[in-house]
Image: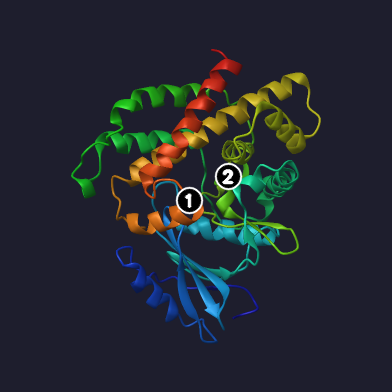
Amino acid sequence: MPNDGPVFSEISRVRRQWAPNEVRDYIAALPIWKEPVEIRQKFGGLTNRTYFAHVEGKPRYAIRVGFDQYRTRQTSVIQCTLAAHALGIGPRLIYAEPNLSVTDFVEGTGMQLAQMQDPAIMRRIIDMMKVIRAGGRVVRETISYWWPFDTVRRYMDAMETGKAATGWTPSPWADRLPRYREITDRLELGIGPFLPTFTHNDMAFVNMIISPGGEIRLIDWDGGGYGHPMFDLGEMLMWAEADERTCVAAVEHYFGSLTAADMKQRLTEVHSFQAIAALRLVTECLETDLDPYYHVTPEEFAEGMKEVLPGQTPALIGLAEMLLPRFEALWAEYKHLFPA
């Protein structure tokens, strides 16, 4: 492997329609390998495929294969990955071509949901968010802009019209969309003026690795970009199923001492982002289901669900149905705390 920075290729050779074994064989034949590698697929992604390159039986490198879709732009993913490494919170990039990247394997164990709910670990995650928030200076090239409310609206547009892959048949959930649109508009009104910052925008526990030394590293920068500095906080609290006391403590740890008026506004925003984060995942699953073989197949997603969320229905609809009650609870809480 080169020691003087990543190798870039401007030519895209991997194809979206390839089966997982075709992608695996292509990775194994990359010219960057200086030692024998065994390529094994790691299941879990919703929009990208992940493989590990094993050297002498141990994972040494991680390979991500993805294509532009939804909110993800591959050039932005690469730039965010480079920035994360420069900030000391992500792995080193080894090689990149359009639609494929190779990084060092992150040693450690995957974050578990129960760990994210631990107050001490939550504070460490928030400390990492502060590093990201202040880290825009290390971003070298153009990256995406992330506004979750418009992303949800685009997902709902697709759910109403359907997609060519499934005969332009609207989503079975289409009759719910007028209500979801009204909720999205209402939640957006809770956001005050802000300065965009560098953000990860997918603060799920599955994207965090705890190293043997206890450091937390972030992977999967598919959603990385400039955005609201509190979306990451709200999304993490959504996954952690945080109560109000936990939300207050998280905001205080993120911002330090606040006036009563500032605290009220920050809490309004964090509750808004919790609810829209849940609705974003629900609608993304339902939109994906309109073209289920675009890249990651339902069978691959099912394998990932079995590993990451055992006990849930191993399908896109299973993740949507798991998150829907959380969304409804967060929306009810928002209306109660911040009546119109």
Q: Residue under circle 1?
A: 310
- Residue 289: image x %, image y %? 32, 46
Q: Residue at x 18, y 44 (%)?
A: 167
> How many C-alpha atoms fall within 10 Å of the one at disc 2: few (<14), some, or many (≥20)?
many
* Mark before the other along the chain sequence, 1 or 2: 2
Horizontal side of 58 relative to 38 (left or right) equals right
Pinpoint residue 135: horizontal percent, then vertical percent. 69, 50
Q: Work out whether residue 262 can be spotted.
A: yes
Name the residue tied to disc 2: 226
Furthest residue toward bottom:
35
Q: Is mark 1 on a helix, strand or loop?
A: loop
Helix, strand or loop for disc 2: strand
Residue at image location 72% in from the left, 23% down from the top: 262
Res. 284 mark: none
Q: Residue at x 38, y 37 (%)?
A: 154
Judge from the rendering whether residue 168 lies leftward or rightward of residue 296; answer left or right: left
